[in-house]
Amino acid sequence: MAFEIRDRHGASRSVAYLQFAAAPFVLLTGVILQPHNPPPILIAVITTSLALALGAWVCWSRPHLLPDLFFWAAPLIATSVISGLNLMTSDASTGSQLFYLWPVLYAANFLSRRVIYLNVIAVSVGEGLVVVIALRAANGFADWIALSIALIMTAVVVYSLRDRADQLRRKLEGQALADPLTGLANRRAFDDALAAAGRWAELSGRPLAVVTIDLDHFKSINDTYGHAAGDDALQVVAAAMQEVANDGDLVARFGGDEFVMLIRGDERAALNAVDRMRALVRADTTLPSGPPGLSIGVASLPAHAATVDDLVRASDAALYTAKSNGRGRVAVSPAPVVPGAAPAVPSEPAVPGR
């Protein structure tokens, strides 16, 4: 987004820190150390100091009262205040110019690239006015160019470090939500996706399906052919599931030899995906153990469950039925599962080799 805020809590704290520091500094340099300033300037400085203190308290203790607009506009406001105070006091000293670092660092750390560009331009213009007007010397222009370059490089470095940190964070988040063997989503990612899909189904009134898959006699594959062959079998099934998943669907591994598919569709869509997935697994010729048998349970919302939690239970119950009826089968949940009730038994036999 053009005007996004990367970390609203961090941004509010940063603004508060600046104003907590700036309020006494402005009062000290503009009033206490310069008591002979004209009354209008003294009044303006005192008012500004009080406003900064009040703003600091609000940002620290009541940040929810401030709109997002304030936080992306904060560096532009700070630049205007810094420039105005420096112009009023004719102060172009190094100390006063260093205050421009705050809006540059703030924007580079919390705001989008477009706002960073706007802020650097505003800082350069404000600092240029102060230096040229206050110094009234030939070296004023050189000082303005030097400080502008320094601030631009500061923004570039901070933004680069921030971008690198964001990349590492996304990578770590991806690793935390993925199964390391198959690359599929893990249980944590599935639970998050299930909750989001439940809200989607409720708002849209559209069906949602869960397919639970278990490899038959997986322990025998490991014992006979080795764990490497078992891993290969898991990866073949995972690849087949990914192949048949549509946009908006989620494929996850719960651990061991159990997989699950979250499908934004009804029972028919789920069974079509199951048929295609089973065909892909049967067509594999790379496994020394041959294609693994699969027991599969299918349930959909609202046909077989009232909530997403019930939907998962209904799919698990259907899987239990498929395994109880001889494995290598597809079973569909016949009715909603009541929480705490025993697994439902379908009114018709599970479909073998569907």
Image (cartoon, grey):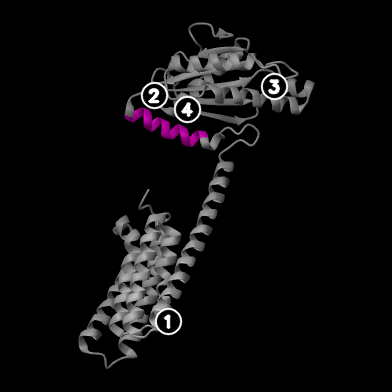
In the image, which disc is placed on residue 95?
1
Say which amino acid is labelled 1.
Answer: Gly
Of mark 2 and mark 4, the one earlier in the sequence is 4
Of mark 4 and mark 3, the one earlier in the sequence is 3
Q: Residue furthest front?
A: 138
198 inside magenta stretch: yes
- Does any portion of residue 343 appear in the rendered image? no
Element type at mark 4: loop
Disc 2 versus disc 1: nearer the observer: 1
Callout 3: 10 Å neighbours few (<14), some, many (20+)?
some
Q: CA distance from mark 1 to mark 3?
A: 71 Å
* 149 with respect to 177 (left or right): left
Task: Identify the residue position indicated by label 2 in the image.
Answer: 306
* 286 with respect to 167 (left or right): right
Q: Is residue 318 above or below residue 190?
A: above
Callout 2: 10 Å neighbours few (<14), some, many (20+)?
some
Residue at image position (54%, 9%) is: 350
**Callouts 2 and 1 close, C-beta under 8 Å:** no
In the image, which disc is placed on residue 218?
3
Say which amino acid is labelled 4.
Answer: Asp
Secondary structure mostly taken by the magenta-highlighted segment of the chain:
helix
* 280 with respect to 290 (left or right): left
Percent x, y of residue 279: 59, 13
Q: Which residues are magenta?
A: 190-203
Of mark 2 and mark 1, the one earlier in the sequence is 1
